[in-house]
Image: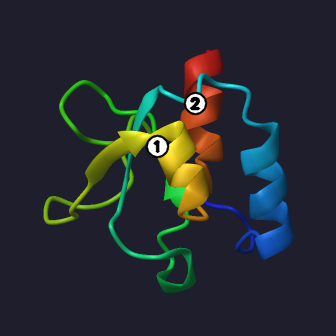
């Protein structure tokens, strides 16, 4: 479910700050920077793909901790978060 508009930098910072998950938890993200559109980190589905099913068959994902993703200016994927709540 795409957002109506991209999150602003301030909104992404707030999402990351409010993410209470363990900082050592493994997540996946694209190796691109937030300025290139790769601003979210995702919960893996067990097969190194995002739980929210974003990306395509050729999309590259890298594994890192929540803490490392935040240091790279990434923010949590809201859709992955909603899926984990269901």
Q: Which of marks 2 and 1 is nearer the N terminus?
A: 2
Quadrant in the rendering for residue 20: top right
Q: Which mark is residue 3?
A: none
Q: Is residue 49 left or right of residue 27?
A: left
Q: For the residue labelled by badge 1, is the local secondary structure a helix, a strand or a loop?
A: loop
| Place of residue 18 in the rendered image (x, y in percent of width and height, measured from the top left) | 82, 38
Neighbor class of circle 1 (other Cα within 10 Å; few <14, some 14-19, many 20+) is many
Query: Closer to the camera: disc 2 or disc 1?
Result: 2
Q: Which residue is at 73% across, 35% downward?
A: 19
- Please tell me whether residue 49 is drawn above or below residue 40 in the rendered image: above
| Place of residue 63 in the rendered image (x, y in percent of width and height, measured from the top left) | 30, 44
Q: Which residue is at 18% across, 31% downward?
A: 47
Residue reaching furthest to the bottom: 36
Q: Which residue is at 83% across, 63% downward?
A: 11
Q: Which residue is at 56% across, 27% downward?
A: 83
Query: Is residue 8 something one can see in this rendering?
Result: no
| Place of residue 9 in the rendered image (x, y in percent of width and height, measured from the top left) | 77, 73
Residue matched to label 2: 23
Query: Is residue 33 something one can see in this rendering?
Result: yes
Residue matched to label 1: 42
Comparing 78 with 86, the one in front is: 78
Q: In this view, does 75 lie to the left or right of 9?
A: left
Q: For the residue labelled by badge 2, is the local secondary structure a helix, a strand or a loop?
A: loop
Comparing 55 with 46, the one in front is: 46
């Amino acid at each position: 479910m795409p957002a109506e508009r991209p999150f602003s930098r301030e909104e992404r910072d707030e999402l990351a700050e409010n993410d209470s998950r363990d900082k050592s938890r493994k997540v996946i993200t694209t190796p691109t920077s937030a300025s290139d559109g790769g601003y979210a980190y995702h919960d893996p589905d067990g097969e190194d793909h995002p739980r929210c099913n974003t990306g395509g068959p050729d999309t590259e994902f890298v594994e890192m901790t929540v803490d490392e993703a935040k240091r790279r200016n990434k923010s949590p994927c809201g859709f992955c978060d909603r899926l984990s709540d269901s």
